[in-house]
Amino acid sequence: MARVAIVTGGTRGIGEAISLALQDRGHKVVASYAGNDEKAKAFTDKTGIPAYKWDVGDHEATLEGVARVAEEVGPVDIVVNNAGITRDGVLHKMSFEDWNEVMRINLGGCFNMAKATFPGMRERKWGRIVNIGSINGQAGQYGQVNYAAAKSGIHGFTKALAQEGAKYGVTVNAIAPGYIDTDMVAAVPAPVLEKIVAKIPVGRLGHAYEIARGVAFLCSENAEFVTGSTLSINGGQHMY
Ligand code: NDP
């Protein structure tokens, strides 16, 4: 059945692959983005998927953005909370602003999107929320107290909201990607990246479409008994 799906940060990187995977499965997809208009336009021209601009870390802007999508496309049944940023630095050099901004967007964005969409899903007795966490939220990472805390928070948020949605046909799951070949990882210095790849048993970075396939499964009708889970897609880098 075709559903209306919002993929936050859905215009590039992992989000772009998720938008395409959901479109491929027949859903009416909307991609949100933060400010890269040029990339968003190129994405819409290529895929036909509309792109809506708002900051998911801004509560009011998110409520307004989702209301606009509901009016123009339809009530939202699938949400993929994929938008995320990094502001890396060791703690003694990290500013409060870098801490706050990562928490506001990466974790606050999930809350804001859920506030805007979960009540409707609950009323209609069907919904799928997939939150994109990270291997670094599971295992921690040097120089990323802000990012690791926000991503770890996403895993807790997922399990708590899953309990609230379970009786109403709304599943809430997380995916914890390992290192995926996107702009975010391109920003990691080459020598650091080499050391990271050496620790991945599969021996390479992941591809965005490998995350997207997992998301598509969790958003499907077939995944109705899967809730509160975290699917690690990381080439075997972190097993537990
Ligand atoms: P990219 O940096 O390639 O893309 C980020 C996307 O998020 C862009 O579309 C960007 O919009 C959007 N975005 C950023 N901030 C906001 C905001 N405030 N409001 C709305 N949209 C926003 O990221 P990746 O594809 O690499 O990562 C996607 C997700 O996967 C993130 O949550 C990341 O933490 C997670 N992840 C990534 C890993 C990796 O190896 N790449 C590993 C583990 C997790 P715009 O284009 O306008 O800037």
Image (cartoon, rainbow, N blue to C red):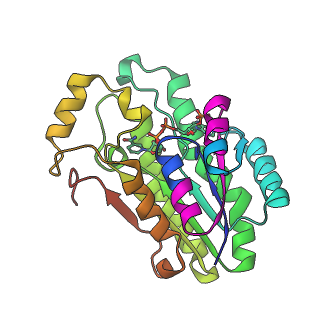
> Along the horizontal axis of the image, is 59 left or right of 96?
right
The quarter of the displayed image where residue 1 is located = bottom right
Image quarter of residue 194: top left
Identify which residue, 16 or 119, lies in the foreground: 16
Residue lying at the far right of the rendered structure: 71
Is 191 part of what is drawn in magenta? no
- Depth check: 6 or 170 in front? 6
Visible in this render: residue 157? no
Q: How many marks?
A: 0
Left or right of 67, for residue 108: left
The residue sitting at 32% across, 57% down in the picture is 233
Residue 125: percent from the left, percent from the top? 68, 80
Q: Residue at x 70, y 57 (%)?
A: 115
The magenta-colored residue range is 19-44
- Of all residues, the one furthest to the top in this rendering is 93
Q: Residue at x 38, y 26 (%)?
A: 187
Q: Is residue 216 above or below residue 42?
A: below
Expressed as whole percent of the image width and height from the top left, the position of residue 110 reads 59, 51
Q: Position of residue 70 (x, y in %)?
A: 80, 60
Q: Check the picture and name the quadrant holding the C terminus.
A: bottom left
Note whether 221 is above or below 129 in the view shown.
below
Q: Position of residue 113 (x, y in %)?
A: 66, 53
Question: Which residue is outermost to the front?
Answer: 46
Residue 107 visible in the picture? yes
Decide: is 224 above or below 216.
below
- Whether 37 is among the magenta residues is yes
Residue at 66% in and 44% down: 44
